[in-house]
């Protein structure tokens, strides 16, 4: 159907629209109270359109729309679709799929506190998201010093009688696995952990003081001493928290800074009038995007995944569709939420401070990025000169071999484009031809032969696909003269016109084809740093794959020999018990609780694992 005909048929309902280009790619996703008015506005007289919209409209060849019952529903759907498709012209949180959370596994009888990468509807309590996994790990370390919460992966039920581990003996766990603490008392500690993670540290102090005095009165001096140490640590944390408001309400304060196609939103988390933490988030956006749209997109995308929505959110400037956002945030919180842009007074001062922090963070990021870009350009230039290449090497591939005494032999291929890792082009190989002991030369020849022969066939159109058709400007082999000579045999056999080099680890010597002596790049050379980074990344990728295969073999070997236990039952057993050790310790009555395990199979597993 022609675009003009589709525009005539647009409904007046609220909904979401998806703009597409000629190839069917989604360029932009938006919401509207009135789909007809909103979508048709893109194709009216071009005057008055922003530069971004004008460029967008020039690429639109088609559109789709989804009708919703309300504008709030449209906002929720828009947020989910942006997250799924990441359109080019939408404002998007950078790397938002990787933001970590702290999870309290409330679905377990004896919950744990752990770092996770996804928020699931599994009954657990989540705190975050955070931008720094390092900061999350530091928080977990502090939590484990303050609260004796278990860290093991055991499936623990009341009445269990395992032997306590070292954490119990050093005061880091109360051994629920040995029934030294009941579920109710353990839950009290977990409740304290949740209050701590909410930022209400001072709310814990009165209760802990009462517990300490009760323990001392009952002559439980070790427990009293542990609580005393908790109190001291909590008081130090509370003293460091800055009072930023005279009231005791919860607020998030958002400040915004922008440079080109990168925006930074800084957030101060105020709980009970005290600043308990802060974080910053980066967003990809069009240079023509205005601040109101960027802030609105952040509010929409961040709070859709946030574990807590405060009663008041202070903004450095008003946002688009503020009323709709307030209604949506209210549904998330369960009570009224206010988006406010203060113009004077203490709140305005606080917003200005957050905005200033956003600008400082953005300046630091830009400075680091510019320095990194200079180093990359210098490194590529140095490699061009050292390797006598006609141009700076844009694509570099590196290969490495990993094995254990010739077993589970694997190879890695990592790709760097313009000095940066292209993770989506990494490949890993299981070596087929090496038998009877380790032979890295033969393994390297196999992986190179497989990679380049497939690439040649893809180029010739003999087989479908294009994953190997893009040949590198340089191939880096981990090793010295012998490894390089072995690799060159395959290259010459296949008549591939690509320069190969070897990097020997002991003295970081660079071996080139046809040269008797190695090239020694200066220790401070950016070119050497780049080669070392690529070589180390190939080693990391190879050894990670090797460990995965070795772990699967070790974990699966015992279960694979049991009659009646196939891949599905094996997965169900591992998922239910967590380890082969726990399966071996299980009684028949426990085994039959696993999905798909009948009593006959349970008896067979029991007999096999108990010998």
Image (tube, helix red, strand yellow):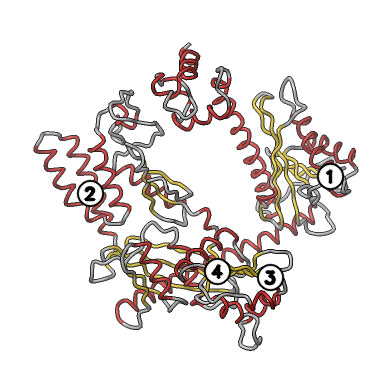
Marks 3 and 2: in contact by CB < 8 Å?
A: no
Label 4 to label 3: alpha-carbon separation: 14 Å
Q: Quadrant of the N terminus?
A: bottom right
Q: What label does residue 232 carry, if any? A: 2
Mark 4: few/some/many CA within 10 Å (<14, 14-19, 20+): many
- Circle 3: element type: strand
Indicate whether 316 appears above or below 135: below
Label 3 to label 1: alpha-carbon separation: 33 Å
Label 2 to label 3: alpha-carbon separation: 64 Å
Is label 4 or label 2 in front? 4
Which residue is under mark 4? 16
The residue nearer to you, when weighing 250 against 604, is 604
Mark 4 vs 1, N-terminal side: 4
Is label 2 or label 3 in front? 3
Is label 4 or label 1 in front? 4
| Residue 95 locus on image (x, y percent) | 55, 58
Asked if one can make out residue 27 in the rendered structure from this viewpoint, the answer is yes
Indicate whether 409 appears above or below 115: above
Which residue is under mark 1? 463
The residue nearer to you, when weighing 577 against 274, is 577
Which residue is under mark 3? 62
The residue located at (85%, 58%) in the rendering is 390
The residue located at (26%, 47%) in the rendering is 192
Mark 3 vs 1, N-terminal side: 3
């Amino acid at each position: 159907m022609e675009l003009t005909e589709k525009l005539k048929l647009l409904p007046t309902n609220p909904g979401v629209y998806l703009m597409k280009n000629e190839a069917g790619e989604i360029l932009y996703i938006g919401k509207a109270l009135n789909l007809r008015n909103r979508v048709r506005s893109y194709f009216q007289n071009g005057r008055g359109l922003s530069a971004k919209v004008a460029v967008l409209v020039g690429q639109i060849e088609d559109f789709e729309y989804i009708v919703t019952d309300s504008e709030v529903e449209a906002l929720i759907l828009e947020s989910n679709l942006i997250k799924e498709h990441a359109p080019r012209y939408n404002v998007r949180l950078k790397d938002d799929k990787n933001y970590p959370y702290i999870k309290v596994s409330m679905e377990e009888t004896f919950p744990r506190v752990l770092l996770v990468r996804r928020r699931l509807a599994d009954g657990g309590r989540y705190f975050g998201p955070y931008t720094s996994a390092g900061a999350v790990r530091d928080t977990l370390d502090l939590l484990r010093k303050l609260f004796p919460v278990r860290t093991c992966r055991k499936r623990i039920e009341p009445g269990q009688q395992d032997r306590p581990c070292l954490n119990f003996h050093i005061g880091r766990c109360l051994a629920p696995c040995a029934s030294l603490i009941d579920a109710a008392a353990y839950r009290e500690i977990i409740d304290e952990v949740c209050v701590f993670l909410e930022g209400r540290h001072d709310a814990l102090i009165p209760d802990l003081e009462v517990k300490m005095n009760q323990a001392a009165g009952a002559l439980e001096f070790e427990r009293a001493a542990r609580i005393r140490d908790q109190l001291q640590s909590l008081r130090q944390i509370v003293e460091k928290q800055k009072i930023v408001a005279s009231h005791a309400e919860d607020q998030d304060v958002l400040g915004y800074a922008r440079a080109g196609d990168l925006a930074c939103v800084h957030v101060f988390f105020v709980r009970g009038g005290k600043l308990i933490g802060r974080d910053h988030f980066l967003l990809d956006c069009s240079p023509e995007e205005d601040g109101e749209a960027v802030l609105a997109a952040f509010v929409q995308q961040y709070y859709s995944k946030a574990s807590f929505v405060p009663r008041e959110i202070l903004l450095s400037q008003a946002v688009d569709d503020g009323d709709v956002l307030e209604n949506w945030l209210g549904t998330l919180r369960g009570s009224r939420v206010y988006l406010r842009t203060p113009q004077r007074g203490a709140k305005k001062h606080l917003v200005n401070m957050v905005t200033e922090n956003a600008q400082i963070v953005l300046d630091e990021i830009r400075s680091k990025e510019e320095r990194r870009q200079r180093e990359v350009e210098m490194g590529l230039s140095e490699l061009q000169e050292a390797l006598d290449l006609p141009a700076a090497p844009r694509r570099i591939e590196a290969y490495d071999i990993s094995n254990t005494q010739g077993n589970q032999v694997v190879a890695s291929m990592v790709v760097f484009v313009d000095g940066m890792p292209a993770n989506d082009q990494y490949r890993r190989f299981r070596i087929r031809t090496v038998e009877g002991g380790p032979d890295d030369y033969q393994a390297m020849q196999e992986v190179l032969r497989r990679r380049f022969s497939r690439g040649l066939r893809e180029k010739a159109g003999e087989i479908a696909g294009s994953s190997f058709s893009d040949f590198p400007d340089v191939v880096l082999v981990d090793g010295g003269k012998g490894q390089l000579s072995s690799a060159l045999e395959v290259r010459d056999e296949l008549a591939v016109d690509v320069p190969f080099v070897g990097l020997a680890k002991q003295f970081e010597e660079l071996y080139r084809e046809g040269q008797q002596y190695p090239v020694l790049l200066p220790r401070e050379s950016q070119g050497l740093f780049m080669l070392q980074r690529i070589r180390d990344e190939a080693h990391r990728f190879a050894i990670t794959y090797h460990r995965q295969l070795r772990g699967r073999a070790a974990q699966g070997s015992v279960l694979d020999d049991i009659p009646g236990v196939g891949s599905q039952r094996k997965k169900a057993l591992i998922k239910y018990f967590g380890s082969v050790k726990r399966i071996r310790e299980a009684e028949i009555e426990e085994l039959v609780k696993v999905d798909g395990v009948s009593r006959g199979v349970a008896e067979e597993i029991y007999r096999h694992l108990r010998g």
